[in-house]
Image (cartoon, rainbow, N blue to C red):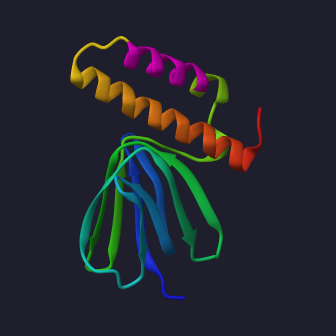
Amino acid sequence: MRLFPLAIYESDGIFYEGDAQSLTVPAEDGEYGVQALHENVVVAIVPGILRYTKDTDEVCYASVSNGMLRVEDGDVLVLVETAEHPEEIDVNRAKRKEEEAREAMLAKRSLREFQLAEMQLKREMARLKLKADFDGPK
């Protein structure tokens, strides 16, 4: 299988840099996939689960927050606010944050505050799903 250079950056540093066989990111209308020789594109990333296959055939998963994907001349760049592998997720913290987001949504303040709470809720739900799917309940 053909490879492409993949760089995944989160706000506080490098999450992954190396060659990859494939990449799938959560997008507004579902999932968006990339393989080698993909055409140039920019895609908005929403909170959810990102999946990439390294050149060693290892499939890796990460919970990601908002960001963007850019494919340009064969190079693939992912910029997200946060990215976490399943083993990095603290279930208790994620559950607490999920509950806080639900409460904020019910507070019915401004539309902007509602949208921020909704995004936080989606992020925490993705984190909990990833942890449950790949680490088992804790």
Of residues 39 and 99, which is closer to you in this image? 99
Q: Residue 103 at what x, y percent from top left?
A: 45, 14
Residue 136 lies, with reference to residue 95, above or below; the image says: below
Q: Left or right: 101 with respect to 137?
A: left
Q: Is residue 85 magenta?
A: no
| Residue 50 coordinates in the image, percent (x, y) | 50, 56
Tell me if 8 is positioned left or right of 56 in this view. left
Which of the image's four quarters has the N terminus?
bottom right
Which picture quadrant has residue 61? bottom right
- The residue depicted at 54 percent of the width and 42 percent of the height is 126
Image-based side of 108 in relation to 134, left or right = left
Tally the numbered discs: 0
Q: Which residues are magenta?
A: 95-106
Compared with residue 29, is residue 107 higher up or lower down, i.e. above or below?
above
Position of residue 68 relative to residue 23, above or below, is above
Q: Nearer the viewer, residue 10 or 61?
A: 61
* SS assignment for the magenta stretch, majority: helix
Quarter that holds the C terminus: top right
Q: Is residue 55 above or below residue 78?
A: below
Query: In the image, what residue occupies the spot 40% across and 15% down?
Result: 106
Quarter of image, res 75: bottom left
Please give left or right for residue 86 compared with residue 109 in the image.
right
Q: Report the residue at 62% width, 46% height from top.
A: 130
Residue reaching furthest to the bottom: 1
Where does the image place residue 17, in percent across and percent down from the top left?
Answer: 46, 63
The residue that appears at 23% across and 25% down in the rendered structure is 112
| Nearer-the-camera pick, 62 or 12 | 62
x, y percentage for residue 60? 60, 60
